[in-house]
């Protein structure tokens, strides 16, 4: 939280004293102004009496009146000077109280900001734990168990929570039989599944028709009920399985990487954040992805997808060999 409204904070103990000091300064200023007016008036009367006494030096009464008015002027000046000194003292006190109050207010604001930040952090951590738990439940229900691959399981749960928070996708990297496809299907059971080997990536890479193809294929394949589950629960999420295993196409002898074109288009769409959590699985490490699709595609993938490396062994059940 960048700023905290002062009205949101409770008044400090020095607020009342500060208010009293402001009132005292205001009253002292008014008294100084009043006494200054009286001094100016006394000075004018004394000056006029002095002029009359000088014009009539033989008149003792005029000289006595001038002396009396000069005395009155002196008294008025003394009273004004005392009021000024009192005003200065009260102004200094007000400044001290204002500084102390500002420090207390700053401490209160910092404490409140820390409380709100801690609260937000606690909420974020709680939401992350909930997302991790949700991912774990999905993985277990989908057949990717923690017992089989504890490190990959925990890693994937954290990555899924991170991807949800960042509105990013997941890119699962690992060797054959590590459970990438099983994990992807478990995390996004209603997502549109695209197999890089068997599906027509060239058609899916066509600009303008991709979204309609995604929705129509899902609707036609699963029916309206499953289609709306996909729309509501996964918000249009999709899975591209076995990226890198697709065949390249040749047109008049020129090689076309339609998968690269599809990835480029999907990453462009995800620059502002994905609605769901799209997932890509591949056997290719980063270096091979860059070699196959180029550094431009790899850079975009790194900007839109959280990479998860599967380190376990081949989990597929092996049948006996008879020889």
Image (tube, helix red, strand yellow):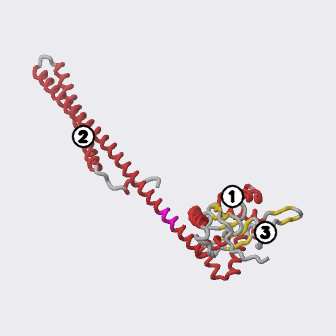
Q: Residues within 10 Å of mark 1 (few under 14, many from 20)?
A: some
Label 3, on which residue? 202
What's the residue at 84%, 62% (across, down)? 255
Mark sitting earlier along the chain (2/3): 2
Does 209 sit above or below residue 77?
below
Q: Which dot marks residue 95?
A: none
Which of the two residues, 246 or 74, is positioned nearer the viewer here? 246
For numbered disc 3, what is the local secondary structure?
helix
Q: Are marks 3 and 1 in contact (CB under 8 Å)?
A: no
Label 2, on which residue? 28
For residue 298, side relative to residue 8 (left or right): right
Q: Are marks 2 and 3 in contact (CB under 8 Å)?
A: no
Percent of width and height locating residue 322? 77, 78
For numbered disc 1, what is the local secondary structure?
helix
What's the residue at 39%, 55% (across, down)? 112
Mark sitting earlier along the chain (2/1): 2
**Residue at mark 2 to residue at mark 1: CA–CA distance:** 70 Å
What's the residue at 89%, 64% (across, down)? 252
Outermost residue, left side:
61
Q: Which residues are magenta?
A: 123-129
Mark sitting earlier along the chain (3/1): 3
Which of the two residues, 279 or 235, is positioned nearer the viewer here? 279
Main secondary structure type of the part rendered in magenta: helix
Q: Quadrant of the C terminus?
A: bottom right
Label 1, on which residue? 300
Q: Quadrant of residue 141?
A: bottom right
Tally the numbered discs: 3
């Amino acid at each position: 939280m960048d700023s905290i409204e002062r009205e949101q904070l409770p008044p400090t103990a020095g607020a009342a004293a500060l208010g009293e000091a402001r009132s005292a300064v205001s009253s002292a200023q008014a008294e100084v102004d009043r006494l200054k007016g009286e001094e100016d008036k006394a000075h004018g009367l004394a000056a006029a009496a002095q002029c009359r006494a000088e014009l009539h030096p033989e008149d003792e009464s005029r000289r006595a009146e001038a002396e009396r008015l000069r005395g009155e002027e002196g008294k008025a000046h003394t009273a004004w000077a005392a009021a000024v000194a009192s005003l200065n003292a009260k102004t200094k006190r007000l400044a001290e109280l204002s500084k102390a109050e500002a420090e207390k207010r700053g401490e209160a604001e910092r404490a409140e900001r820390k409380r709100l930040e801690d609260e937000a952090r606690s909420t974020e951590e709680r939401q992350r734990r909930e997302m991790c738990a949700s991912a774990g439940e999905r993985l277990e229900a989908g057949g990717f168990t923690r017992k089989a691959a504890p490190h990959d399981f925990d890693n994937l749960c954290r990555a899924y929570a991170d991807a949800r928070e960042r509105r990013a996708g997941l890119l699962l990297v690992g060797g054959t039989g590590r459970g990438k496809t099983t994990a992807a299907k478990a995390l996004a059971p209603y997502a549109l599944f695209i197999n890089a080997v068997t599906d027509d990536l060239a058609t899916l890479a066509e600009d303008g028709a991709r979204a309609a193809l995604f929705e129509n294929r899902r609707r036609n394949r699963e029916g309206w009920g499953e289609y709306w589950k996909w729309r509501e629960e996964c918000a249009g999420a999709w899975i591209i399985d076995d990226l890198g295993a697709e065949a390249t196409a040749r047109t008049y002898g020129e090689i076309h990487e339609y998968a690269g074109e599809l990835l480029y288009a999907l990453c462009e769409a995800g620059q502002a954040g994905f609605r769901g959590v799209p997932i890509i699985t591949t056997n290719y490490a980063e270096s091979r992805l860059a070699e196959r699709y180029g550094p431009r595609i790899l850079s975009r993938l790194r900007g839109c997808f959280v990479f998860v490396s599967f380190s376990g062994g081949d989990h597929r059940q092996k049948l006996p060999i008879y020889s």
